[in-house]
Image (cartoon, coloured by chain):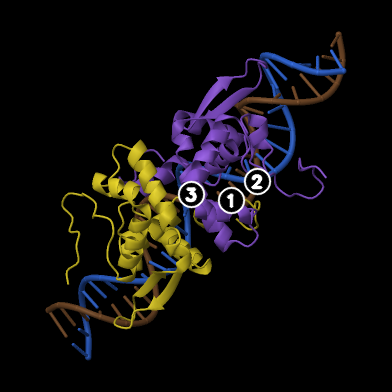
Chain colours: A purple, B yellow, C blue, D brown
Amino acid sequence: MSERRSNCPVTFALDSYGDKWSLLILRDVLFLGKRTYREFAESDEKIATNILANRLEKLERNGFLKKTRNPENKRTNFYNPTLKTMDLIPMLLEIVQWSAKYDDQTAVPKDFIRKLKRDRFGVIQDIKEKIKQGERIAPPPASPGKKTGRKG
Amino acid sequence: MSERRSNCPVTFALDSYGDKWSLLILRDVLFLGKRTYREFAESDEKIATNILANRLEKLERNGFLKKTRNPENKRTNFYNPTLKTMDLIPMLLEIVQWSAKYDDQTAVPKDFIRKLKRDRFGVIQDIKEKIKQGERIAPPPASPGKKTGRKG
DNA sequence: TAATTTTACTTGCAAAACACAAGTAATACT
DNA sequence: AGTATTACTTGTGTTTTGCAAGTAAAATTA
């Protein structure tokens, strides 16, 4: 996408992160606490590494991610969310709510949807706080034969 | 996209309408009162007609649009929004709000953003009502030398 | 009523984006 | 010193997109 298609706000959003992968990377950063290339590459959706590198570069260039060095490890970098990315949380929560209604296979706890409907603003604030603390928001995926991080 | 990439709600949404064109068609239906092939084809973003036909078919197949005959004209069809599509309004409004903040060229009246921040629920209800009445929500684009309106 | 225009598509082809596998350089671990 | 890991890049085939042109049916105009 080389030049603006229009001045529509929907178009601006689509041209910023409207492909099959960018928003998943931002989801990983916001809801799953991921920060490194390897963590993104390991996601359930199995993004190809060349696409991943390309999207990280675009997301950085467009001000969604800030690339910083890991002071404890010289080969890994951190991709941290900017305010521009944090401000996508309300939109992402709308997506979560919509998919919970229309996709019966979608992996969202019903409790969370209820809470979201009851106190949207509170949930958003809560998530922002947790992200700043580096906490994970969403539960790990229920993939069989993989450890989930829960204990018995 | 032939099979599910994951059970993530974000992925479900992306795989349903997460390309460069589908959401623009839904925008046209929801906010600009468009219903026919020709009206979609005339949008600012200039979608290619083969892509348009393909997306309309997908959107219909996935339950976003209901194709009905125009009783007054046998060659035009109407593509009407379903509840599934109407339920995207809150998400679209989040996008509008986000773009209004991060894109200084975006064509959204500031009044609207203020109202949206003050009374989100009211704005959503209002839009739903207007759509049911067949009214246009967004202002026509400020393109010079083009006729914008239909008359009654 | 015959010719023209409009609408809603389809077709063909070149260009771009994507997916997959493999390779590489720097760093870290053993 | 040798091996493994991390963060990429490169090559190649496939899929998707964009553009131009074409078509059939219905509506409009002469």
Q: Amino acid at mark 2?
A: Glu
Do callouts 3 and 2 point to residues on the same chain? yes
| Chain on which label 3 sits | A
On residue A50, the disc is none
* Discs 1/3, front: 3
- Would you say residue A18 is visible in this rendering? no
Image point (42%, 63%), residue name = B86
Residue C4 point in image, percent of width and height: 20, 73
| Chain of the residue where label 2 is placed in the rendered structure | A
Using residue B16 as the reference point, say whether residue D24 is left or right of it. left
Q: Nearer the viewer, mark 3 or mark 2?
A: 3
Q: Is residue B91 left or right of residue A55?
A: left
Q: Residue at x 79, y 44 (%)?
A: A146
Whole-number angstrom distance, CA of label 3 to CA of label 2? 28 Å
- The residue identified by callout 2 is A45
In the rendered image, residue B1, in percent from the top left (x then y), is placed at 60, 55
**Distance from Cα at disc 1 to Cα at disc 2:** 8 Å
| Few, some or many residues within 10 Å of mark 3 (<14, 14–19, 20+) | some
Which residue has dot 3 on it?
A120
Helix, strand or loop at mark 1? helix
What residue is rendered at 36% in x and 58% in y?
Answer: B124
Q: Which mark is residue B11?
A: 1
Check chain identity for marks 1 and 3: say if they share one: no
What amino acid is labelled 1 in the image? Thr
